[in-house]
């Protein structure tokens, strides 16, 4: 075009007129003119021709949409003198590069593009001037001048970013070679570009593209070998927009260039395309012919496009025009491989279905494969989007890939696969609780790829830590009632444990009991018999339970029982628990054994006083375990009471000492001891008066003589006869026994 002609003229003038002093100038880059015929027809440096390598020198992002290997060649002749050549190819690379956006990692597929462009003015005469009769200019020899540009581009696409459906980005490294009359100079530059696509689907507009590129973000100077003259490549910015209309039948373009804004349009029919653009000074017209199913390499068929462009230039070359022809191999005829956009990467799940989202050729069938078996189909829309909701998954590894299928163009290559591993089985788990000093250690043996374990004892939570392969451990503070010799609780402690594997499956075990509990008797229990039957429940965390070093029987329902002998008074019943780690844990039950008698009932007046005084060993019943509370106290009963209460030494009598007390009378030894110790005396008749009843005063005097009580000076003590029941009540209020009773019923102290 006109700009190429001016470019070469400017470069030649700059070189031929250079002086000795070093000069740094800025040259116009030839890169913006090195495009294919289609790009020429649509405004030249058009940055929104996504997927078309004809404009790879304008925007490196165009290669991001390349699906299979294309190739293009363009030739043009300007003014009958300039040779113009443009070559480009690109191909997807089988590499992935991790890119972090908003803290999310994307594995980006890269597309490589290679390009070459040249514009050459050949056979330029090198003239000399001869002065004689007249001035004669003759050609001494001829030389060539022009530019060569080499480029390598990398592009990739991001989906659903920055408000666009697709954002393509590219970077290009290029080398620029300028040659003139046998001299060469070289420079390098870095270009960046991006194209955003937004699917509109509103009224007649299908989608909108916005594109931008920047040339020579970084560049080196070009220096001639025989001079110090330096030239730099300028920073150039190109922006453009595009709208696809009428279900992809037409497109309109707007973009900038060195000659101002350019408007362009393209209309597409079956196998034919018509294009045109103008910037107000020049106008371009072009056509494109599409050829499909062309046999080529490796038994493949290819699609080709032949483009032609005609450009009319303004004054001073009003009669001049340029013609360009491009041949582009668009790639193999079959549909290009679709892509799975979501899920983005391999993952593990506990779900039995997965939702797929992807892109592919427009309006084609999508076949979905799982482990090489076709299981479902979908369809792309006219934007190339497809999705499938609720794709069923098999237990284990699911290698999912897709292929696009067209009745005319057969089936595409496989997409990259995504591996979804389905794990719906919760991890197996065995749990044990061990006492360890001031702590409780919970150990869990798990079978599976466990990611996290949490637990709670009595609703107090804690996290587990892995200690070895398949073993997790958590440490809890030991509850107060599990301290050594602490009173046992009626309610067993409960453990809750949850194991969560990497797929999200959760095995939750709640209300796991430990260690053991006693339902009867409860702590601080009052018992009236000499034996108590202990009933309780052991958990699976227990190996065995003993009372007084004797094992308790544990049945198949984890229930246990034990008959425990009680002594009168306070009893500290110790239960020893042996845990799974062979540690022992001792808990206690406080039982008050009150001595009672068979003839006492709930209606017996002063029953509790009788039982308390009998438990203290002050009062006693007969050999048949009767107390006879309504009977009056006799001398013989008093003798037995004092002797037993004071633990007096008793010797068995062989002969009767008194006529009213036989030698074989069970109370005879007690009577004899009373006489021998001077506590009681006999009558002058030779009888003891065994059956004589007594007043309270008589009894108190005898007990005082025995040292059981201090001398009573109570004026209210009468001379009336007293029953055994009334005696018990009276004694229970005496200072000597009131304090003893208070200590007896105090469950907090006094155990041995």
Image (cartoon, rainbow, N blue to C red):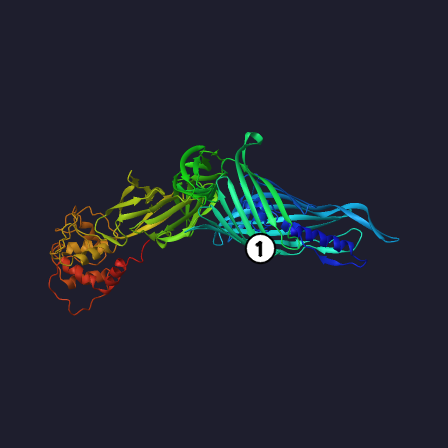
State left or right for residue 186 relative to residue 635. right
User: Compared to 191, does 347 lie above or below?
Assistant: above
Residue 170 x %, y %? 58, 49
Q: Is residue 425 visible?
A: no
Residue 690 pos. (x, y %): 13, 54
- Look at 59% across and 43% down and name the residue there: 112
Q: Is residue 511 left or right of residue 443?
A: left
Res 113 → quadrant: top right
Q: Position of residue 332 (x, y in %)?
A: 53, 36
Q: Would you say 436 lies left or right of 746 here?
A: right
Picture layout, residue 150 above or below residue 747: above
Name the outermost residue toward the front.
Answer: 133
Residue on which disc 1 sits: 279
Where residue 369 appears, as percent x and y from the top left, is 44, 35
**What is the count of numbered marks?**
1
In the image, what residue occupies the spot 74% across and 58% down? 24
Q: Is residue 261 visible?
A: yes
Q: Is residue 517 left or right of residue 357?
A: left
Q: Nearer the viewer, residue 677 or 136?
A: 136
């Amino acid at each position: 075009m006109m700009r190429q002609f001016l470019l070469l003229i400017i470069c030649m003038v700059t070189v031929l007129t250079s002086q000795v002093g070093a000069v740094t100038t800025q040259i116009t880059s030839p890169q913006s003119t090195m495009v294919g015929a289609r790009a020429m027809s649509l405004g030249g440096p058009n940055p929104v021709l996504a997927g078309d390598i004809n404009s790879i020198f304008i925007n490196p992002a165009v290669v991001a949409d390349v699906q299979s290997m294309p190739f293009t060649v363009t030739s043009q002749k300007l003014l009958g003198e300039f040779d113009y050549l443009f070559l480009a190819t690109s191909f997807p690379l089988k590499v992935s590069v991790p890119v972090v956006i908003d803290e999310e990692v994307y594995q980006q597929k890269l597309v490589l593009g290679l390009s070459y462009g040249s514009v050459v003015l050949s056979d330029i005469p090198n003239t000399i001037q001869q002065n004689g009769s007249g001035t004669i200019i003759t050609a001494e020899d001829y030389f060539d001048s022009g530019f060569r540009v080499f480029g390598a581009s990398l592009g990739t696409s991001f989906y659903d970013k920055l408000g666009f459906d697709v954002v393509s980005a590219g970077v290009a490294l290029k080398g620029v070679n300028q040659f003139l009359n046998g001299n060469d100079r070289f420079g390098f530059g870095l270009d960046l570009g991006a194209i955003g696509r937004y699917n509109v689907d509103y009224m007649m507009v299908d989608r909108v593209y916005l594109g931008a590129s920047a040339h020579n973000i970084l560049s080196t100077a070009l220096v001639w070998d025989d001079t110090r003259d330096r030239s730099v490549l300028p920073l150039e910015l190109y922006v453009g927009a595009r709208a696809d209309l009428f279900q992809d039948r037409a497109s309109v373009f707007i973009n900038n260039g060195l000659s101002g804004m350019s408007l362009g349009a393209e209309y597409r029919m079956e196998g034919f395309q018509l294009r045109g653009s103008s910037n107000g000074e020049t106008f371009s017209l072009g056509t494109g012919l599409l050829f499909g199913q062309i046999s080529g390499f490796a038994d493949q068929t290819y699609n080709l496009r032949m483009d032609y462009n005609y450009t009319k230039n303004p004054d001073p070359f009003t009669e001049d025009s340029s013609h360009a022809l491009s041949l582009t191999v668009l790639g193999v005829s079959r549909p290009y491989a679709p892509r799975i956009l979501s899920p983005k990467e391999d993952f593990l799940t506990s779900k039995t279905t997965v939702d797929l989202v992807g892109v592919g050729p427009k309006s084609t069938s999508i076949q979905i494969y799982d482990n090489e078996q076709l299981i479902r189909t979908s369809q792309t829309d006219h934007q190339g989007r497809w999705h499938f909701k609720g794709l069923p998954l098999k237990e284990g590894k699911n290698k999912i890939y897709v292929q696009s299928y067209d009745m005319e163009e057969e089936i595409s290559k496989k997409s990259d696969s995504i591996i979804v591993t389905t794990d719906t089985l919760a991890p197996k788990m065995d749990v044990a609780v061990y006492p360890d000093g001031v702590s409780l250690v919970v150990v869990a043996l798990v079978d599976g790829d466990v990611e996290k374990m949490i637990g709670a004892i009595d609703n107090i939570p804690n996290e587990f830590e892995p200690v070895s392969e398949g073993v997790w451990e958590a440490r809890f503070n030991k509850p107060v009632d599990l301290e050594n010799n602490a009173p046992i609780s009626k309610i067993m402690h409960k453990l809750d444990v949850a194991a969560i594997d990497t797929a999200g499956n959760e095995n939750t075990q709640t209300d796991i009991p430990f260690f053991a509990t006693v339902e009867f008797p409860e702590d601080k229990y009052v018992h009236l018999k000499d034996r108590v039957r202990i009933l309780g429940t052991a958990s699976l965390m227990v190996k065995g339970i003993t009372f007084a070093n004797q094992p308790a029987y544990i049945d198949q329902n984890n229930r246990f029982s034990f008959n425990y002998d009680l002594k009168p008074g306070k009893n500290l019943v110790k239960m020893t628990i042996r845990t799974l780690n062979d540690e022992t844990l001792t808990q206690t039950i406080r039982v008050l054994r009150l001595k009672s008698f068979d003839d006492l009932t709930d209606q017996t007046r002063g029953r509790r006083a009788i039982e308390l005084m009998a438990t203290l060993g002050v009062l006693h019943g007969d050999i048949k375990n009767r107390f006879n509370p309504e009977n009056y106290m006799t001398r013989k009963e008093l003798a037995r009471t004092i002797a037993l209460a004071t633990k007096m030494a008793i010797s068995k009598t062989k002969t009767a000492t008194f006529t009213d007390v036989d030698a074989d009378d069970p109370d005879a030894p007690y009577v004899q001891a009373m006489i021998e110790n001077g506590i009681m005396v006999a009558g002058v008749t030779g009888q003891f008066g065994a059956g004589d009843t007594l007043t309270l005063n008589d009894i108190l005097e005898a007990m005082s003589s025995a040292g059981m009580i201090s001398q009573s000076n109570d004026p209210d003590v009468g001379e009336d006869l007293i029953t055994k029941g009334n005696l018990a009540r009276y004694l229970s209020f005496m200072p000597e026994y009131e304090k003893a009773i208070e200590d007896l019923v105090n469950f907090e102290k006094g155990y041995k």
